[in-house]
Image (cartoon, rainbow, N blue to C red):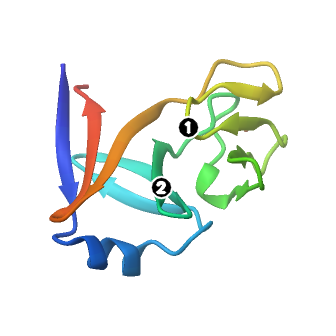
């Protein structure tokens, strides 16, 4: 089961709230997740690294759409969650889509 949440209340509010290439921590439901905007696409993923649990909010985004963990520099594709460098499970990613009334983010029920 999944649940879709709406962040903000307009497209322009979201664009103003989420600068490009900055990892932003947002609270959705009772979870804190990470949001990144690349050009006009938004990506949402677990804010905790699947390796040893470092905060990916402190990480960085490279030029090919990967988040780099600040602790051991493992890299994950922010679109698919696939681990690109390192040996651990994939990163949990969430579907998100910008609409006229805000950013829709779909999370699994916990
Ligand atoms: S905790 Fe993220 S790479 Fe080790």
* 2 and 1 marks in contact (CB < 8 Å): no
Q: Position of residue 62 (x, y in %)?
A: 77, 54
Q: Which quadrant would residue 98 be assigned to in this image?
A: bottom left
Q: To which residue does mark 1 refer?
A: 79
| SS assignment at label 1 | loop
Task: For ligand 1, tell me if the residue under mark 2 lies within 8 Å.
Answer: no
Q: To which residue does mark 2 refer?
A: 41
Quadrant for the C terminus in the image: top left
The numbered mark, 2 or 1, whose residue comes first in the sequence reads 2
Q: Where is residue 99 in the image (x, y as percent from the top left)?
A: 23, 58
Q: Which residue is drawn at 71% across and 26% down?
A: 83
- With respect to residue 46, does 25 lie above or below? below
Q: Residue at x 32, y 49 (%)?
A: 97
Q: How crowded is mark 1: few (under 14 residues within 10 Å), some or many (20 or more)?
A: some
| SS assignment at label 2 | strand
Q: How many labels does the image show?
A: 2
Residue situated in front as seen by the camera: 14 or 26: 14
Relative to 87, 34 lies left or right = left
């Amino acid at each position: 089961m999944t649940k879709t949440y709406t962040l903000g209340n307009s497209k322009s509010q979201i664009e103003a709230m989420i600068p490009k290439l900055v990892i932003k921590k947002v609270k959705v439901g009772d979870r804190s997740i990470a949001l990144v905007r690349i050009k006009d696409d938004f990506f949402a993923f677990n804010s905790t690294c699947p390796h040893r649990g470092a905060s990916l909010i402190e990480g960085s985004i490279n030029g090919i759409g990967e988040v780099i963990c600040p602790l051991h520099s493992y890299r994950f594709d922010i679109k698919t969650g696939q681990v690109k460098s390192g040996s651990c499970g994939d990163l949990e990613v969430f579907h998100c889509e910008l609409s006229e009334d805000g950013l829709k983010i779909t999370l699994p029920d916990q």
